[in-house]
Image (cartoon, rainbow, N blue to C red):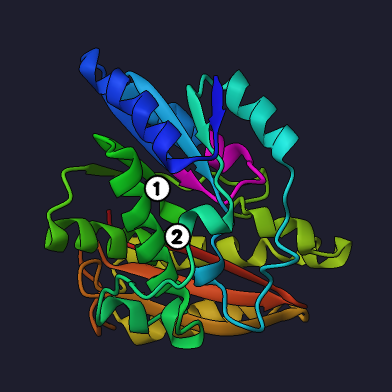
Amino acid sequence: MKVVGSIPEIRKILREIRLAGKTIGLVPTMGYLHAGHLSLIDEAKKHCDFVVISIFVNPTQFGPTEDLDKYPRDFKRDEKLAREHGVDLIFFPDAAEMYPKPFFTYVVTEQLSKTLCGASRPVHFRGVTTVVSKLFNIVQPDVAVFGQKDAQQAIIIRRMVGDLNFPVQVIVAPIVREADGLAMSSRNVYLSQEERRQAPIIFNALKSAKEFVSKGDRDASAIGKLIRRTIGGSPLAEIEYVEIVDPITLENVQNIERGTFVAVAVRFGKTRLIDNVVLID
């Protein structure tokens, strides 16, 4: 496994990989790898010959009051896990490599980036789509794998790929959860012991909603109220949003249909957690 921080160097290596007739997969990450990330690596290995992961805490997707400086980092641990899971190359650039100064050009998906997480994090998805576009141009992967936990992100990236004609297949892999249902996230380490104990209420609420829908309840408003009431049973939970939306437009729906999903953002203290489930598969 190689570790590369320079754009010219990774391009040179991957040019040789392509000339050898091998397909390339990319798993973009911000590091501090957990089982969710590792599942994305395993998924990429199913679809291509050579797997690249990027480890880059992307400054442009953090707002001025967010946790850029405190975001967890442990490259030695990440390198060990990547090696154990068969990664062929880690792209590990610094901010100066990715964003030479002055930097003026950004990629924006209108509409989709303004709702759900985008409502409270107005620069977030502009940063995500910009850095993913750069990674696609640098790595030129045949396949890129993202996680369903960040459902809005996956939808936005698929739209960007379609709109801008990137020649890459986007695969969205299922959420990986802890034994008690909490969606795995690098930010889970921020939770206090009591916050961690209460955090699974999020998935419990989503499971209950899916069960009600399976029994015939299609009223999005009623299902949303059920989720809010369940999460509200945790004294430490502060709900940012509960939205039931169309999987293509991310617009709120009145009636739940196939593919409709519910997305939530909940704060426990200073830690912001997101989760989602498709209500009718």
Name the image quarter holding residue 110. bottom left
Q: Can residue 172 be seen from the camera position used here?
A: no
Side (left or right) of 178 relative to 218: right
Look at the picture and state if 51 lies above or below 274: above
For numbered disc 1, what is the local secondary structure? strand
Mark 2 residue crowding within 10 angstroms, few (<14) / some (14–19) / many (20+): some
| Residue drawn at 50 percent across, 60 percent down | 207
Name the image quarter holding residue 7. top left
Query: Residue 254: x and y, percent?
Result: 25, 85
| Residue drawn at 74 percent across, 43 percent down | 74
Give the amino acid at mark 1. Phe
Region rendered in magenta: 28-38
Residue furthest top as drawn: 20
Q: Can residue 274 be seen from the camera position used here?
A: yes
Do residues under tags 2 and 1 come within 8 Å of each other at their CB atoms? yes
Look at the picture and state if 210 lies above or below 20: below
Give the amino acid at mark 2. Asp
How far, Cα to Cα, is label 2 from label 1?
A: 8 Å
Name the image quarter holding residue 85. top right
Query: Residue 39: x and y, percent?
Result: 50, 34
Q: Which residue is mark 2?
A: 150
| Residue drawn at 43 percent across, 80 percent down | 118
Q: Which residue is mark 1?
A: 146
Look at the picture and state if 187 lies above or below 229: above
- Residue 218 in magenta stretch: no
Mark 1 residue crowding within 10 angstroms, few (<14) / some (14–19) / many (20+): many
| Residue drawn at 74 percent across, 34 percent down | 76
- Residue 32 in magenta stretch: yes
